[in-house]
């Protein structure tokens, strides 16, 4: 079966084979997008950023300053 990625499916009628091809192509597009999202979320910098945001939120919730004030 040919792969038709990102195609505008203007189908003339209820041709079952064509509709099945369109459904498979849409599922393959969704799979590609999920793979790209997983690759982004697996990036070390993205994980580190999420950890930093959670740490900041916890400190704000405790009403603590982000840094200790300097003495003198």
Image (tube, rainbow, N blue to C red):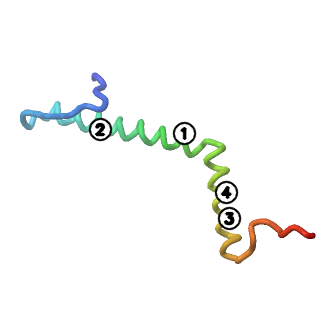
Task: Measure the C-alpha gap from mark 1 to mark 3.
Answer: 25 Å
- On the image, the x and y values in percent for residue 49 come to 64, 52
Give the number of the mark in front: 1 or 3.
3
The residue furthest top is 2
Element carrying mark 1: helix
Give the number of the mark in front: 4 or 1.
4
- On the image, the x and y values in percent for residue 39 come to 54, 39
Residue 56, disc: 3
**Closer to the camera in the image, 5 or 52:** 52
- On the image, the x and y values in percent for residue 71 come to 91, 70
Element carrying mark 2: helix
**Closer to the camera in the image, 70 or 2:** 70
Element carrying mark 3: helix
Residue corresponding to mark 4: 51
Residue corresponding to mark 2: 26
Q: Residues within 10 Å of mark 1 (few under 14, many from 20)?
A: few
Task: Measure the C-alpha gap from mark 3 to mark 2.
Answer: 40 Å
């Amino acid at each position: 079966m040919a792969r038709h990625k990102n195609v505008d499916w203007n189908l003339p009628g209820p041709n079952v084979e064509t509709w099945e091809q369109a459904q498979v192509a849409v599922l393959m597009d969704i799979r590609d997008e999920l793979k790209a999202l997983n690759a982004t979320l697996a990036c070390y910098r993205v994980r580190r950023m999420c950890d930093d945001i959670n740490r900041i939120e916890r400190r704000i919730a405790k009403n603590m300053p982000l840094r200790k004030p300097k003495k003198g």
